[in-house]
Amino acid sequence: MWSIKPRAAARAERTRRAARGGEGDEAALLADFELYTADSHPSHFSVKRPAWLTPAFLGVFALVSTALLAFLPDAAPRYRALLAALLGVPEASFSLRLRPFFLAFFWTFVLFVAGSWGRRFKLLVTLTLGFGVATLTLDLLFGALRGALGPPLTVVFANVAVGFAALVLFAWALLRQGALPQDVWVGAVRRRPRRFALRFASAALLSGALAALSSRYLGTVLEGLRGVGLLGGLGPGVVLFFPLFVATLAVTEFLSLRAKGEGARFSVAFLVPALNEADNVAACIRSLDRAAERYGRVCTLYLVDNGSRDLTRALAEAELKRCRALKGHVLVCREPGKSKALNAGLKHIEEDLVVRVDADTQVAPTLLTQTVLHFADPAVGAVSGLPLPLTGGTLLGKLRAAEVYLNQGFVRLGMGAIDGILSMTGVFSAYRRSCLDRVGGFAEGINGEDTDIVLRIGRLGYRLVNDPRIHVFSEVPGSLSALREQRLRWFRSTFHVAARNRSAIRRRQGVRGVFSLPWALVQTVRRSLMVPVLVYAGAVALLEPSALFLRGGAAVLAVIVGLPFLVSVGVLLAYRRFDLLPFTPLYAAFRLLRAYFSLEMLFTLPLGRAPEPPNPNVIALEGPPRRR
């Protein structure tokens, strides 16, 4: 975690008092604050919003939703009559209660988004007209297919299609009208094998067949799960498809990883940015030394102190002298910003592989022996693993561990089977140095430099590998405010990185550009809507309780718990983390907290056109690499 931790800050304060006799404390603290916010809130592409803004939004949203729902009984018959006239049928029956939700969300969001009223009005027109056109078009399409699908399926598919269209529209509107980074064009230098597209298609077909068979032969069981809120209301076949799709790919990738043999030997450089890490830096260096010793080759450490106000630099230099298999340097980068520190360190590195590790992280002794073998394949550009919590005994540590196994150990593992990995943890990632040179280093002035760098390496045509057998251990936030700051930064990074890599989508650069990046945007928006969905459900229940078909409240419970609860249990069982199973009910509540932070993040994205910060990245040339 890139932040000033309370213990480190307190120790830094005591050190300054001892050195200065208590003078200059205020200026020092202000300097610490500048370093802290350089990465938390990039000045070009984010704005700070007060904590009360999101509760106020939810309150206004509840009022707007109630007003639209009260108007719905008068408007719905007229809309159905319009559909029937356009389709040339006596009656067009659609469930329209989902539609006011998106209109209420769009209209309320425009009131609270950061930007001038002119830009807000432009966003309002885009969202309203876009949603109206998409809704009418899809309703007409599924109305025309009513005879082939049947009335029940027509209603289900129409609602799913309209909901998905609304998510895509919202994400697209923010990308187009938000003050986000400029697009960076990256051309492929390696050809992408066709096997990844074939795997994608095969897994989709197999998962669709399994979902259909489950709906047919396990209908009683699945209905029971829906009755207790463990499956959503879109139909078991629809809900089961994606988990089955990812599971199929995850098994494929895991078997492929296990088939790896011993690889070639590479020279290795550890790149460690550090800011006020006096409590952690010595343990980090000791763990890197053990990993280098197990690797059997002297490795070099480049630790970049990013203007620490505590004893980070002195402790790092002292610990480095005690290392057996690790040599290196403690460098200084006074410009605030983690990416600036990383790029400052890159200027000194000549080794084959660059292993980036956060200073509050400890690695397993087998880190290099497990990581380096993947680079024996010249098509591999970056490798990562599971960033487990260092303080795993705390409640937040348990919840974070469950999150890591579900996200990195399941979803990201599955995406590796189709070369669709979008991001790798900044806590630990290993890169081929030639790839870093080709893409020009880390992006500065944005959130998500760790995701951006591997996405651009992937756009070059190199594979990204996420091996769940590789473990590193890092700190977790120690307070709710620290967790909030971390998640706002993480969720905002999806939009920053997507904006910088728009051309990956436009040019359809592999599975990553066609599927992973657009899907990440849609999923971020979907997560942001979880809390408003609950508020909207309350408004519907207040006006007409029977309209939601709540199954005794199970439909609302499915929003909070749902299928991810079952998936997380299955993943933890697969990894034999039985100790985490008792915390899965709390993990459901943790997901809701993440959803609240994701909603809050949307209000930190300003409308407008922001200037591009310095450090434009080197753009890769199109076509295969030239032979020398």
Image (cartoon, rainbow, N blue to C red):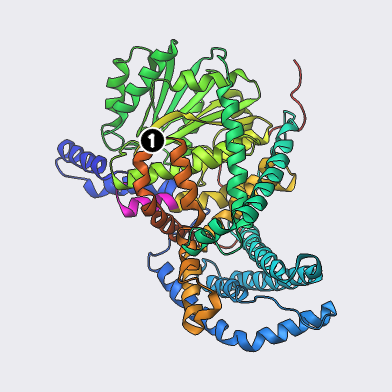
| Vertical position of residue 285 compared to residue 137: above or below | above
Does residue 41 show up? Answer: no
| Vertical position of residue 511 compared to residue 600: above or below | above
Q: How far across and down, in percent of the image, does residue 145 sit?
A: 80, 67
Q: How far across and down, in percent of the image, does residue 541 sit?
A: 48, 79
| Vertical position of residue 439 compared to residue 298: above or below | below
Of the pair 469 and 222, the residue shown nearer to us: 222
Whether residue 577 is in magenta: the answer is no
**Quadrant in which residue 142 is drawn:** bottom right
Of the pair 397 and 622, the residue shown nearer to us: 397
Q: Which residue is mark 1?
A: 306
Whether residue 486 is in magenta: the answer is yes
Report the residue that reaches farthest toward the right. Answer: 88
Q: Residue at x 48, y 43 (%)?
A: 570
Does residue 97 show up? Answer: yes
Of the pair 118 and 579, the residue shown nearer to us: 579
Task: Tell me if 281 is positioned left or right of 569 in this view.
Answer: left
Image quadrant for the C terminus? Answer: top right
Q: Residue at x 63, y 39 (%)?
A: 420
Q: How far across and down, in percent of the image, does residue 12 sit?
A: 23, 39
Q: Which amino acid type is shown beneath numbered disc 1? A: Asn
Magenta part mainly helix, strand or loop? helix
Task: Tell me if 327 is positioned left or right of 570 in this view.
Answer: left
**Quadrant in which residue 178 is drawn:** bottom right
Q: How far across and down, in percent of the image, does residue 527 sit?
A: 52, 58
Callout 1: helix, strand or loop?
A: loop
Report the magenta residues as a range. 477-487
